[in-house]
Image: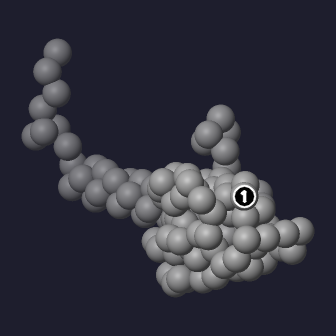
Amino acid sequence: MKFKFSSLRPLDFVFFCLLVAAGIFLTINGLSKSGSKVVVLACGVQYEYDADTDGTYSVEGELGETTFEIKEGKVHIIDSPCKNKICINQGWSSPLVCLPNNVTITLQEPEGGYDAISQ
């Protein structure tokens, strides 16, 4: 049995369009990461930054200043005084760790959010 578009009534079409629009809205709204924060632990001192606010920041570690960038809800280390610069090569990921300078950078989602299993 083939489906015929001619059997659709005008209100069926309106209902379908509203259903698609609601799905798109909920998908976009659900995927946004507003409320996320970047937590930096440097030499036992904790700093918090808004992940939605782009910018370049610095924290003082054991060897010197570690500079990191927050952009579009992601974070990466730009410069660090450590010898091998492994932390810089970690890219846009979380957590970021510079062991020689004793700096850890973590991107945290807001409380009560969904995880990969419950979505």
Amino acid under label 1?
Pro
Q: Is residue 113 visible?
A: no
Residue 25 coordinates in the image, percent (x, y)? 43, 63
In the rendered view, would you say 22 is above or below 12?
Answer: below
Front residue of this view, candidates 83 and 2 = 83
Spot occupied by residue 70 in the image (x, y as percentages of width and height): 53, 74
The C terminus lies in quadrant: top right
User: Is residue 53 visible in the rendered structure shown here?
Assistant: yes
Q: Position of residue 56 (x, y in %)?
A: 53, 83
- Looking at the image, the residue that sits furthest to the front is 83
Extreme residue in the right direction? 44
| In this rendering, position of residue 68 left or right of residue 59 | left
> In the picture provided, is 17 more to the left or to the right than 78?
left
Q: Quadrant of residue 14?
A: bottom left
Q: Which residue is mark 1?
A: 100
Mark 1 residue crowding within 10 angstroms, few (<14) / some (14–19) / many (20+): some
Q: In the image, what residue occupies the spot 14% across and 21% down?
A: 2
* Residue in the image at 73% along x and 71% along y: 63
Question: How is colour applied across the structure in the image?
Answer: one colour
Closer to us: 107 or 46: 46
Q: Nearer the viewer, residue 64 or 74?
A: 64
Q: Residue at x 55, y 66 (%)?
A: 77
In the picture shown, does residue 94 fall above or below 57? above
Q: Is residue 5 left or right of residue 55?
A: left
113 or 38, which lies in front? 38
